[in-house]
Amino acid sequence: MSNYPLTMKRVYEKSEKEDGYRMLVDRIWPRGVSKQKATVDIWAKEITPTTEIRKEFNHQPQKFDWFKQAYWAELESNPHSEVFIKHVFEELQHSPVTFVYAAKDEQFNHVVILMEFVQTKKQK
C-alpha cells in the first residue's frame, strides 16, 4: 500500500513541490516545453498508447470508450507495464507521484486510463 497520492497534471501547469516524482507519460515531447521547464524525473513514453490508436481516437470524446478498451488491451500486453507499475509503487513509498501529460482535455485522455490501470494493479 502506498503512503502518498498518485495524481495527474498537465505539463503546461506550474511544477510544484507537492507533485513529488513527476513522470511524463506522453509518446511525443510536449510542444513548446523545454526539458528544464517540464521538470520531469522520467519520460515513460513506452507506456503510452500506440500511434495507431492515438490517431484513431484523435481526442474525440465519443470515441473514448473504444479508446479505453484499445489502450487497456495494449497496457495488458505491453512488456513495459509491469516494470512501470512497480516503479510507480516504489516511488509512492517515498513521495507523491504525478503523471504529467500535454493533452488539453483533462477528462478524455490516455492518462485517465493509465491512472485507472495502475490503481487496479495495486491489489496484486
Image (spheres, rainbow, N blue to C red):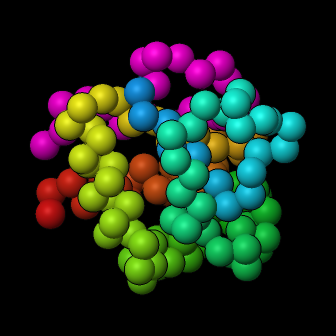
| Quadrant of the rendered image containing residue 15 | top right
On the rendered image, what quadrant is the N terminus found in?
top left
Q: How many marks?
A: 0
Q: Which residues, given as a range, are shown in magenta?
A: 1-19
Front residue of 14/120: it is 14
Q: Is residue 50 above or below residue 120?
A: below
Q: Is residue 12 magenta?
A: yes
Please report the residue visible at 74 percent of the width from the left and 57 percent of the height from the top: 28
Q: Nearer the viewer, residue 62 or 116?
A: 116
Relative to 96, is 43 on the left or the right? right
Residue in the picture at 33% in, 49% down: 88
Give residue 4's position: percent from left, percent from top: 26, 30
Q: Residue at x 46, y 16 (%)?
A: 17
**Residue farthest along the right direction in this orientation:** 32
Is residue 57 positioned above or below 113 on the image? below
- For the C terminus, the quadrant is bottom left
Q: Would you say 21 lies left or right of 107 here?
A: left
Q: Is residue 6 magenta?
A: yes
Residue 68 visible in the snapshot? no
Q: Based on the displayed image, in which of its 4 quarters is residue 121 positioned?
A: bottom left
**In the rendering, at what x and y percent does residue 80 appear?**
42, 72
In the picture, measured across the screen, residue 124 lies left or right of residue 112, that is left
- Measured as percent of width and height from the top left, residue 41 is found at 51, 40
Quarter assignment of residue 7: top left
Residue beneath the point at 49% across and 56% down: 113
Residue 28 appears in the figure: yes
